[in-house]
Image: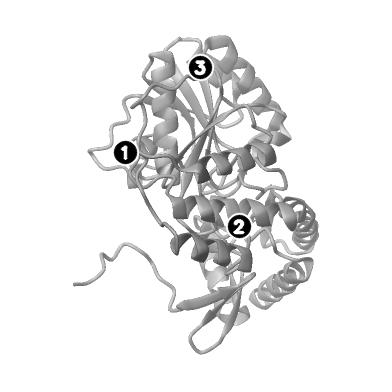
Amino acid sequence: MNLFDVYSLYDIEPVRGLGNHVYTADGTEYLDLYGGHAVISIGHAHHTYVTAIADQVSKLGFYSNSVQNSLQQKLADRLGRLSGYNDYALFLCNSGAEANENAMKLASFHTGKSKILAFDKAFHGRTSGAVAATDNPKIQSPFNSTENVEFAPLNDIEAVEAKLSTGEFAGVIIEGIQGVAGIRMVDDSFLRKLRELCTKYGVVLILDEIQSGYGRTGRFFAHQYAGVRPDIITCAKGIANGFPMGAIIISPEIKPVKGMLGTTFGGSHLACAAAIAVLDVMETENMVSNAAAVGEYLLEELNDLAATHPEVIEVRGRGLMIGIEIKGSAPELRKRLLFDKHIFTGGAGEHTVRLLPPLSLPRSHAKRFIEAFKEVLDSKED
């Protein structure tokens, strides 16, 4: 049997990782500034994380949600305290797409309405409801109905109010920062006005923090820069450092009903142990503040580089979620960084390089990237 050939693969196979690096079988070291697509939050093979998973799987890896699982409440308590959402409730699932599906379903249950408002160039996942709220027809099949989803231009509050004032919408879903679109920033003032409009028209505000959350931007959630409190927050990616997990954080105004949501694997003993270990490490090693400080350094250095290299069009981002838009081919530049400089980076379309490293990234590794990026740009100009 062959693998279903849907991925474009680099001819490199990491077989182990440690901290901010991954290694191939022959021992070649690569600096990881991609984090497996923002998933590796606390670094590869962190001893606290490894110990927690090994200890838990030796006891009980899984049982269904038909019985008590105190690890779920322990995770909820820890997450509430560190994120600032102690008064909210937690529902655990398996992925970001599933988290967004459940969030939109909850909005519809809560309001009794069917429509969702999303934004141009948004990405919310590949399952049926999530892909309908994703502004990319290339990944929508004829099966994926978009009749209950409408889109508005990002940062255009007048266009949003024109939609919401019709009274047809159950919820608005918006990313803290648009990642797949190339690190497109949501204006803080826009987000504050969006919160006001959702309250005014009785619409549930859903913040998709799957890529931008969990400390990545230098705050626990990206929307906290704007000082707003959403009705629902969705999480995944860095929540369990590579163990598949998703979550929705739900306002106390939205009341649960038995059987409203459900999952087979979500919130398993092993997943919770992994997620608790992530929060332990994030707190004890001050990783959110590290993301803010090292991210600020990277943004300053990259903007300085852009001032002397016309190849760089714009640098965008917060913390360790950074997009570098260039005039030429971003995929080609990323290949040169990978094969010539042994640095993994991410991409977004044809012209944007994305940096999504572990939150543990030290300034020395950030400096190595800046030097390598400059060398690649300089050699291309020659």
Q: Residues within 10 Å of mark 3 (few under 14, many from 20)?
A: many
Q: Residues within 10 Å of mark 1 (few under 14, many from 20)?
A: some
Q: Mark on residue 41?
A: 2
Of residues 356 and 58, the one drawn nearer to the viewer in this rendering: 58
Q: What residue type is labelled 2?
A: Ser
> Which residue matches tag 1?
128
Q: Which amino acid does label 1 sit on?
A: Ser
Image position, residue 329 (x, y; %): 54, 64
Residue projecting furthest to the left: 1
CA gap between label 3 and label 1 equals 22 Å
Of residues 349 and 70, the one drawn nearer to the viewer in this rendering: 70
Q: Is residue 167 left or right of residue 279?
A: left
Q: Quadrant of residue 158?
A: top right
Q: What residue type is labelled 3?
A: Val
Q: Earlier in the sequence, mark 3 or mark 1?
A: 1
Q: Mark on residue 203?
A: 3
Judged from the image, the secondary structure of the residue bearing numbered disc 2 is loop
Judged from the image, the secondary structure of the residue bearing numbered disc 1 is helix
Q: Which of marks 2 and 3 is nearer the N terminus?
A: 2
